[in-house]
Amino acid sequence: MEKILEKVNLLWAAAVTLLTAAFGTYWFLFAAFIALNVVDYVTGVIKSRYTRTENSNKGLKGIFKKVGYWVVIAIAFFLSYGFGTLGTIIGVNLGFTVLIGWFTLGTFIVNEIRSILENLVLIGVEVPAWLVKGLEVANEKINDAMEGGGDDDNRN
């Protein structure tokens, strides 16, 4: 039994090392996002069966959409890295651009959670109203920040 635990521990350490090398210290956020992708897809399939609106084209579109999210995240982090490097080359501190990638990942995480909750509500699962409303408010704040509207007073 001890040898099995030792092998499991070794495999876990190797997995964490690889994930950290690929995604950095905060690899678990990327792992959480992919887990949310899977849960959202599964709850979407369950919802479509429950509502009798199953459609293979719609399912395939959902998969392409999830892959598209990852492409957008990769582009956002590439931009962050590129602008940071460019800033170093020209002598301007553009370190804040690292936020582009993290902001994009955070936005997609909130959207995935909202989508999962919407699917659960549609199949009859009791989801606390405060949770749905809290994610709605978070999504609105994110969208406002993306549009540069941070202040309600400055909008037309």
Image: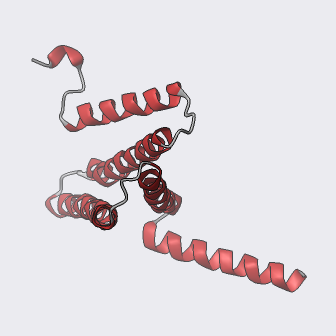
Instruction: Give coordinates of residue 121: x percent, y percent.
Output: 48, 38
The colour mode here is secondary structure
Instruction: Give coordinates of residue 90: x percent, y percent.
Output: 14, 60
Q: Which residue is situated farthest in the front direction here?
A: 52
- Residue drawn at x 46%, y 47% as measured from the top left: 116
Q: Which residue is situated farthest in the top direction here?
A: 153
Q: Which residue is situated farthest in the left direction here?
A: 156
Count of number-bearing discs = 0
Instruction: Give coordinates of residue 40: x percent, y percent.
Output: 45, 54
Position above or below: 149 against 18: above
Position above or below: 77 against 13: above
State which quarter of the image contains the N terminus. bottom right
- Residue drawn at x 33%, y 67% as measured from the top left: 56
Which residue is at the front of the view, 22 or 51? 51
- Residue drawn at x 26%, y 35% as measured from the top left: 143
Residue 33, visible in the rendered structure: no
Which residue is at the front of the view, 124 or 156? 124
Instruction: Give coordinates of residue 24: x percent, y percent.
Output: 46, 65
Residue 6, visible in the rendered structure: yes
State which quarter of the image contains the C terminus. top left
Q: Quadrant of residue 151?
A: top left
Relative to 118, is 81 on the left or the right? left
Position above or below: 63 against 133: below
Q: Which residue is situated farthest in the right direction here?
A: 1
Which residue is at the front of the view, 130 or 10? 130
